[in-house]
Image (cartoon, rainbow, N blue to C red):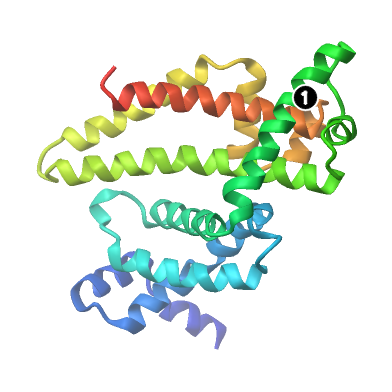
Amino acid sequence: MRSAAVEKERPVEELFGEFLRTRAEDVKWEIVLRHSNMIKSIALRLHDVYASFAQLDDIINEGLITLADAVEKYDPEKGSFEAYAAIRVRGMIIDYAKKQDWVASSVRRRVQKIDQAAAELTIQYGREPTEEEVSAHIGLSLSQYRRAMAISYTRNVISLEEMIEQNREHWAAECDARYPEEELQRSELVEVLAEAIAALDRNEQLVLSLYHERDLKRTEISDVLGVSPVRVSQIHTKALRKLRKRLSQYFEGD
């Protein structure tokens, strides 16, 4: 029975081909279910973004709807479905969180206070302050402090990905598929990103590599580098700020 079931499972490419021809709902949902593990993987990675107001099951349910919409709108000429769907799911989680006032306002203010306090205490102590010292300095509990930093950390990642994807969509709208301009621009973007990353400090490169390539959590990166989680967040934020600046210059034609 098991081997027969495996033999009957069609390649995803074949399913997409049939869906593009027929727009059949059963085919669409078969594609969605084939990629459903992606939702849980992304949701667990972004858990701090929604943990205070939603359960994992809620996010997975929303993710299934998002995946279904992604199947509807996917254009095979514009890259892999997995990459497109992953960005859509991440974006859904962030949009879901943005509807909560605590994400839009209070967390942002807390992160600003944390950054300021960390800088002040570094000068005062002549060393990097601990999480406990920073949180006590601004009157936050350690859990409040860690949640604010985790959300800020994740939102920085998403904002960079959204910036890249939005401009890819802009290229796709302007470039005819029969011409090489879009592929050339994509290649240029890869080159620009590579140059921007190469220009980062060593610790900035390492944090980006450990997070984006190795999928390590902030606390795990902290252990690898031998610094506090807040320092990891600061390094990560600084690196992404530099990359966003360089990408903005590129997209604006500098």
**Residue at position x 23%, y 40% from top?**
171
- Name the quarter where the N terminus is drawn: bottom right
- The answer to which quarter of the image holds residue 115 is top right
The count of marks equals 1
Residue 194 falls in image quadrant: top left
Crowd around label 1: few <14 · some 14–19 · many ≥20 (10 Å): many
- What is the secondary structure assignment of the residue under circle 1? helix
Where is residue 161 drawn, in percent x and y? 46, 41
Residue found at x 67% / y 64%: 53
**Where is 6 relative to 75, above or below?**
below
Q: Is residue 189 above or below residue 50?
A: above
> Looking at the image, which residue sits at the far bottom?
1
Q: What residue do we see at 22% from left, 45% from top?
A: 172
Q: Identify the amino acid type marked 1.
A: Ala
Q: Residue 45: percent from the left, percent from the top? A: 64, 52
On the question of residue 217 being in view, the answer is: no
Left or right? Give the position of 169 relative to 177: right
Instruction: Identify the residue at image location x=23%, y=52%.
Output: 77
Q: Which residue is mark 1?
A: 118
Q: Position of residue 246 (x, y in %)?
A: 41, 21
Task: Pick the residue in front: 30 or 173.
Answer: 173
Question: Is residue 62 in sight in this rendering?
Answer: yes
Q: Is residue 188 left or right of residue 173?
A: right
Q: Nearer the viewer, residue 18 or 252?
A: 252
Q: Position of residue 63 (x, y in %)?
A: 50, 67
